[in-house]
Each structure stands twice: as structure tokens, then as C-alpha cells.
């Protein structure tokens, strides 16, 4: 079992990294492998809605998105972590996620998702909601913790002093591990939920 962890901060050793490392310790204790990718400092453009991915099965821009897609497909869980910018996630991460989720046709049903947000003070819950939407449109259960999945700090390293935030990360990793293991057992015994044929509609018909 393995979890893909994506660090959307432009700083590789900042407070977002502290939160993810706290989770990694628990995943290791739980026997779950992790792949940690740092994308917040990458040059990643947004989706242009060209539809090429429907024909080729991958994004027309052959960058980090297509590389990450291969890892994501084989993963049992996905952790998205971002600092808060104007009550929103880092724009680089959003550009990546828009293209990653739109261009990948593989079934994401029952892959467990968790979002982690980092802020000096406010905007955490808005960013938390923003990131969770990628999971809930894809049939992915969302892992929860003892509080919304946030940790606080301004300067690099400040998050290591947020005792409640660190505990929230550890609890999140334990809950996510439990869900991943439980879903694996459920798939083995019951299989995945039955899917109906998609019936797309819009507001003029």
C-alpha cells in the first residue's frame, strides 16, 4: 500500500514540509509506503481546455503532470498540501491538479484523499474546502482528523511549535491508514461499488 504526497509549497523545507513529514512518520509506522513530490517550485501552466487528453490519454503539455499521473494511478491514497495564499491554495498546485484530474481517465474510486493546509493565521478552511473538491468529484473518500487539517506558522520552522497542528497531522495519517487498509479488505471481499452509466446534462437541455 502506498500514498502519494504532493507538496504545493514553493519552499521545500518550509512549514508545509513539516506537516507532511509528521504524517510520513505515522505512515511508516502503519506499514504504508510514501512517495513525496515537491511541485510548488515547478513551472506548471494551467489547463487550456483543448481536449487532447481525451484522445491521447494524457495532457498535451508533457511535464510534471504526466509524470505524476503514472504514480497517482498506482497509489492507494493522495495527500495534497499547500500554503494559503489569499484564502486559496498555491496557484501552481491548482494548475497541476486541474490538469491532473481532468486529463487522467483511470478510475480513482476509493483512492483515499486528504488535504493539508498551512497558514500564518486565516484562510485555512477555504483552502481546505478547495482542495477537497478534487476528491469528492472523483469518487475518492476524504480522510478526516480531529480538526480541520491545518497547521500554523509564519517563518520556516514555526509549524514545529504548533502542538495541536502536529497532532492533527498524526491523527490524519492514522485515520487515512485505517481507511486505506479497510478499503483494501472491502475491495477483496465485495469489490468496488457498481457504477451507473454517466448521464451528463447542462442547463439548457
Image: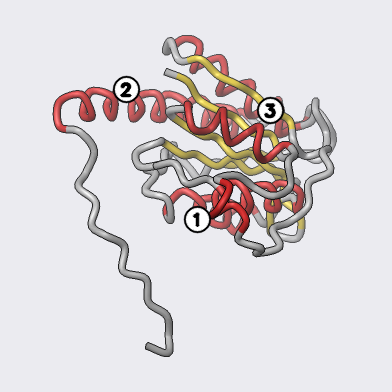
In percent of width and height, residue 53 lies at 59, 52
* Disc 2 element: helix
> Residue at position x 55%, y 23% from top?
23
- Contact between marks 3 and 2 (CB within 8 A): the answer is no
Expressed as whole percent of the image width and height from the top left, the position of residue 185 reads 23, 23
Specify whether 6 is left or right of 9. Answer: left
Asked which quadrant contains residue 174, the reply is top left
Q: Residues within 10 Å of mark 3 (few under 14, many from 20)?
A: few
Q: CA distance from mark 3 to mark 2?
A: 23 Å
From mark 3 to mark 1, how far is it between C-alphas? 21 Å
**86 or 179, which is in the foreground?**
179
Task: Find the residue positioned furthest to the left.
Answer: 189
Does the residue at mark 1 contact the one at mark 2 (Cβ under 8 Å)? no
The answer to which of 168 and 107 lies nearer the viewer is: 107
C-alpha separation, residue under disc 1 versus residue under disc 2: 23 Å
Pick the front one: 173 or 63: 63
User: Which one is earlier in the sequence, the residue at label 3 or at label 2?
Assistant: 3
Q: Quadrant of the C terminus?
A: bottom left
Q: Which residue is mark 3?
A: 37
Q: Provide the residue designation for mark 1.
A: 133
Disc 2 target residue: 181
Amino acid at each position: 500500500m502506498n500514498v502519494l504526497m504532493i507538496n504545493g509549497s514553493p519552499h521545500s523545507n518550509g512549514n508545509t514540509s513539516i506537516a507532511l513529514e509528521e504524517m510520513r512518520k505515522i505512515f511508516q509506522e502503519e506499514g504504508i509506503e510514501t512517495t513525496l513530490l515537491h511541485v510548488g517550485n515547478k513551472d506548471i501552466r494551467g489547463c487550456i481546455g483543448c481536449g487532447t487528453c481525451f484522445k491521447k490519454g494524457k495532457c498535451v503539455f508533457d511535464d510534471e503532470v504526466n509524470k505524476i499521473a503514472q504514480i497517482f494511478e498506482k497509489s492507494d491514497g493522495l495527500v495534497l498540501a499547500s500554503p494559503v495564499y489569499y484564502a486559496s491554495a498555491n496557484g501552481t498546485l491548482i494548475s497541476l491538479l486541474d490538469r491532473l484530474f481532468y486529463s487522467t481517465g483511470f478510475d480513482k474510486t476509493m483512492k483515499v484523499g486528504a488535504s493539508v493546509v498551512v497558514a500564518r493565521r486565516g484562510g485555512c478552511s477555504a483552502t481546505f474546502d478547495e482542495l477537497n473538491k478534487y476528491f469528492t468529484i472523483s469518487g475518492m473518500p476524504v480522510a478526516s482528523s480531529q480538526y480541520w487539517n491545518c497547521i500554523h506558522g509564519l517563518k520556516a520552522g514555526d509549524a514545529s511549535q504548533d502542538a495541536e497542528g502536529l497532532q492533527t497531522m498524526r491523527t490524519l495519517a492514522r485515520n487515512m491508514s485505517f481507511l486505506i487498509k479497510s478499503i483494501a479488505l472491502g475491495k477483496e471481499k465485495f469489490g468496488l461499488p457498481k457504477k451507473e452509466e454517466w448521464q451528463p446534462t447542462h442547463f439548457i437541455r
